[in-house]
Amino acid sequence: MALPANITNLVAAIENTARSVDGVGGGKQYLKLTKQGFWAFGADETEVEDGSRWAINPNSLAMGYACWDDGTNLGEEMALITDEPILKSNLPNLGAPWKEQIGFQLACISGDDKGVQCVYTATSVGGRNAFKTLLNEIAIKARSGSEEIVPVVELGVDSYKHKQYGRIFTPLLSVVEWASLDGAVADKAEAQIEQDEDAEEAPTTRRRRRA
């Protein structure tokens, strides 16, 4: 992970992007919030361990558009928030509407899935709102002058009742700590794990793929 050299540009890009957000992989696995309300990654939909911590790469924050038709991804165009934005008017006609999409890369730094790297993308209002909140938090942290601007989050879930579609689950990206990019992420995670183990020893069980 590497941040842009000019933090001021990053903050400006975050703030500008956050104002526009209203309600890519490189071999990495995809992370998603399933319709059943649990986080999972990979083709086998391995359930994310409760309480695991994930470090988000600030230099991977991206926005753009994705074109879906009946569950099939016909195409997507994404750009880092520090680059020129994707213009919807320049996108080709693929026979289905283009929807706004956000995305970023993240890595698990604790628990059974430590070391797993994923890409998260979302076109839903809930996903875009969670992204907007994350942008604002990173901007505040960066403006403070702190070098620890890597958000370490726990993946949570909220929900609401839709009149037509029933229970709708929405993502929560709860920042539990901040770290720098010099290896402090892993060090802090290890320290937290040891502290938790000393406080209360409990057997751990590997999550299985849900039916």
Image (cartoon, helix red, strand yellow):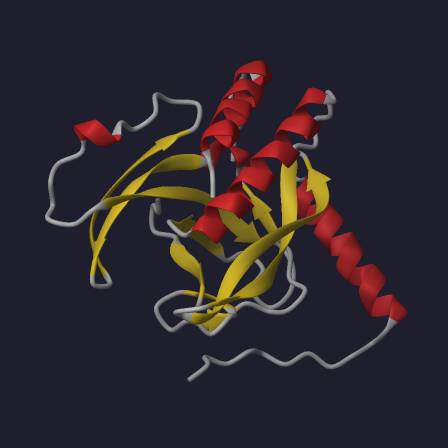
Is residue 75 left or right of 192 when viewed as pictured? left
* x, y percent for residue 186: 67, 48
- Judging depth in this view, the residue of 68 and 116 nearest the camera is 68
Residue 147 percent coordinates (x, y): 70, 26
Residue found at x 65% / y 32% = 149
The answer to whether residue 54 is left or right of residue 31 is: right
**With 173 as the anchor, is 118 left or right in this view?**
left
Location of residue 74 with respect to 165 vertically, above or below: above
Q: Residue furthest front?
A: 163
* Residue nearest the viewer, comparing 72 with 184: 72
In the rendered image, is residue 182 in sight? no
Q: Residue at x 43, y 28 (%)?
A: 81
Quick check: 108 above or below 39? above
Q: Quadrant of residue 48?
A: bottom right
The residue at 51%/48% (across/down) is: 106
Query: Which of the pair 15/176 is nearer the observer?
Result: 15
Give the left or right position of residue 110, taking residue 162 as reference. Answer: right
Closer-to-camera residue (128/208): 128
Q: Residue 124's x, y, as percent?
A: 41, 52
Percent x, y for residue 34? 44, 68
